[in-house]
Structures are given as structure tokens and as C-alpha cells.
Image: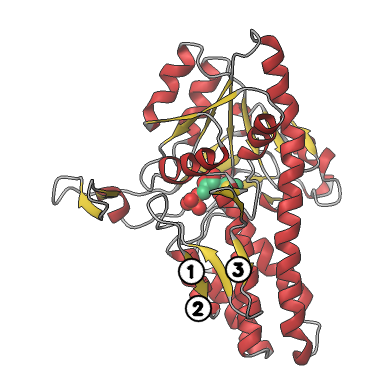
Amino acid sequence: MKIDGNSTRTIWVADDGRTVDVIDQTKLPFAFEILKLNDVEEAAAAIERMVVRGAPLIGATAAFGVALAMADDSSSENLAASCDRLIGTRPTAVNLRWAISEMMSCLERLPEAERKDAAYRRAAEICDEDVEINASIGRNGLGLIQQIAARKPPGEPVNILTHCNAGWLAAVDWGTATSPIYMAHDQGTPVHVWVDETRPRNQGASLTAYELGHEGVPHTVIPDNTGGHLMQHGQVDLVITGTDRTTATGDVCNKIGTYLKALAARDNDVPFYVALPSPTIDFTLSNGVEEIPIEQRSGDEVSKMTGVSEDGTVRTVDIVSRGSPVANYAFDVTPARLVTGLITEAGICEASRDGIAELFPDRAAPAGRRK
Ligand code: MRU
């Protein structure tokens, strides 16, 4: 997608052929800065600090983290230790575990001398596959937007609400939830996006609004608690969110607050879709509420807010009464029964074990092993 008219991905190998460049998302939307990752520790820290974030990009960064590790020391000991370090960075997005296991199964059977080149190759493939998958999600979700547009008076936009940033900044390109939106916009279907600000880290206000703005997609940033009101007044035609981990039964874990949007959508008969690449499906889990680990992050993310003042200085200020305890659950789980459908690279399916198994028969658990 584009920044100031220039096509950009979120992660790439630098011109030296060894180090890995990423967009520093902690600086957006106030500054566009590239951060260089020199070794596996820097890749791990970038995931922990949310320099890079979003389930697919966390996976892609971890894959390149393994490549950086192999460039330094391609021994089996370092491979195992580096994968352990990376896997411990963030607990919820399952794409991290998926990417590490892809890298492991590619590298562990190779002689040490071949591991470095193979690691960079596989990491680059994971990135290219992510772009292809997300483009397919866009093509598959486009029809939903076009169907709604066809029922509206000509020229009236389809109003889509999204939560957090499941855009191209959260992936390698296109994004998941935003991919059908970008495709609809490119094809001339009028769309307007309600962007949840997404407290506490404001990924909607800082990142989704930033990328929609650079693509020229009409949008409005709203406080997180506005969606229900808009839905009651017929101002939301469709909700599309991303996900960090979806169970084999269709329970969807995503940024905290997604569940409340799904409840409001159900109460107001607004379709609630979740866009996801198949590496986000955790085929080992059946009950999202009980089984998905929910990351808890620093209370500082709740008690402080960062913004830019009129003189251009970026400042962080306290917004909570000193001494009041805060809680920072980063994700919640929306049960499958509240999800209208899942938009994947293989098509759209019901959020259910059967729906997912129909699209991904090779990966779904055999009937006898179902919980
Ligand atoms: O904490 P974050 O910013 O990594 O959370 C990101 C989300 O919740 C996204 O919606 C999810 O990763 C899907 S990204 C295509």
C-alpha cells in the first residue's frame, strides 16, 4: 500500500542483504521512521515493544528474527534458543507460533552451512504468502461490500466499522479487515469507515486512520464507545475486524473491545465479519474464552497517553488519577455465535467447526479427535 504515493511493505531485507528494516509503528502517525533490526534480540524486542504488531506482521518479523539468528550462528543450539526467545515475546497471536514452526521445520533438517540462506528464503516466502493471502481475503470480502452497495441509493457509501488496526500495517501488505475495503474503494464502490480509536494504544486512531488517509479512503475516527449508538441509528452497514487467534470452532480473539462491538452488532442486526489468514486459525483449540491466552500489558498504556502538541513536540502525559490501579487486558474473545462469517483466503465460511473444516479440510482435526 502507499505512503505519500510510494508503495511500501511493512518489513523487508535491507540493501546489505542481511539486516531487516521495519516501519517503527510506535512513532506513527506523527513520524514515519524506519528501524533496522540487526539481530534476533532486536527482532524480539521490536515485537515486545510493538514497534511491529498485528498478528501477520508479528509472524513475519519472527521469521526474519530466525533468519538474523542464523546469520550470526547457524548451530542447532542457537536455532532452538532463538525460537524460544521469539516465541516468548507475545502470547496471543498464534501467527507467531505458526511462523516459528514453519522456520523450524525448514531449518532443523538442513546442515548448518545451508541454514542462513534457507532461513532468509523461507522468511521472504512467508512475507510473499501473506501478501497473496491478504489479496485473496480482499477479493473474497469485496462481494459483501458490493452486495450492500447494490441495496443503497446510488452514490451512498457503505458504512463499515472496524476495530484496532487490521490493516496493511498489521500485515506485510493489504491487511486483513481492510483488504476488502481497499479493493472496494479501488473499484469505485463508495465506502466510509468508522474507525474505533482502540484504547489503550489507539491503533485505530494512530494506524488505521493513517493508512486509510494515505489511500484516500473516507473515514471517521470515533471513541470506542460510539459504535453501539451508530448501529442503533442505522449508520453502520457492516462490521469487519481482524483476529489474533481463531479457534477451530470459530471463536475469535481480537483486540480488547471487539466482543462489545459484536454484541452491539447482534442487537442491531448488523453483520459482523472477521477477516483472517489461515495461519491465524489455531486448530488445536475448541473454546476461545477458556483456552486462548490473553496478554496483559503494562498499566502505563492505560494511565498515559502520547500525542503531538501544537509546536510539533511529541509528549506523553498522565491521564489517570495518580495512585488509581489500572488493568490492561490486550485482547478479548468473541464467541462464534456472534460472528456472521469468516472471510479467509479460501472463501467465506460460517464461524463454526464445520464451516472452517470445509475450507481447510487438510488442517482440521479428524472427527474422532474433536472436543
Ligand atoms: O496488539 P496489536 O496491535 O498487535 O493487536 C492487533 C489486533 O488486534 C489486530 O486486529 C489483529 O492482529 C489482526 S491484524 C491483521
Q: How many neighbours does mark 3 have within 10 angstroms: few (below 14), some (14-19), or many (20 or more)?
A: many
Residue 59 against residue 163 in the figure, above or below: below
Report the amino acid beneath label 2. Answer: Glu
175 relative to 320 in the view: left or right: right
| SS of the residue under disc 1 | strand
Q: Quadrant of the C terminus?
A: top right
Compute the Cα span from label 3 to label 2. 10 Å
Disc on res. 62 = 3
| SS of the residue under disc 3 | helix
User: In this orientation, which residue lies closer to the viewer: 223 or 350?
Assistant: 223
The residue labelled by disc 2 is: 41
The residue sitting at the front extreme is: 5
Q: Position of residue 167 (x, y in %)?
A: 57, 44
Please tell me which of labels 3 and 1 falls first in the chain.
1
- Asked whether residue 265 is in view, the answer is yes
Compute the Cα span from label 3 to label 1. 15 Å
| SS of the residue under disc 2 | helix
148 relative to 114 in the view: left or right: left
Please tell me which of labels 3 and 2 falls first in the chain.
2
The residue labelled by disc 1 is: 35
From the viewer's perspective, is the residue at label 3 or at label 1 nearer?
1
Q: Position of residue 19 (x, y in %)?
A: 59, 78
Q: Position of residue 276 (x, y in %)?
A: 67, 43
Q: Residue at image x 37%, y 42%? A: 199
User: In this orientation, which residue lies closer to the viewer: 263 or 15?
Assistant: 15
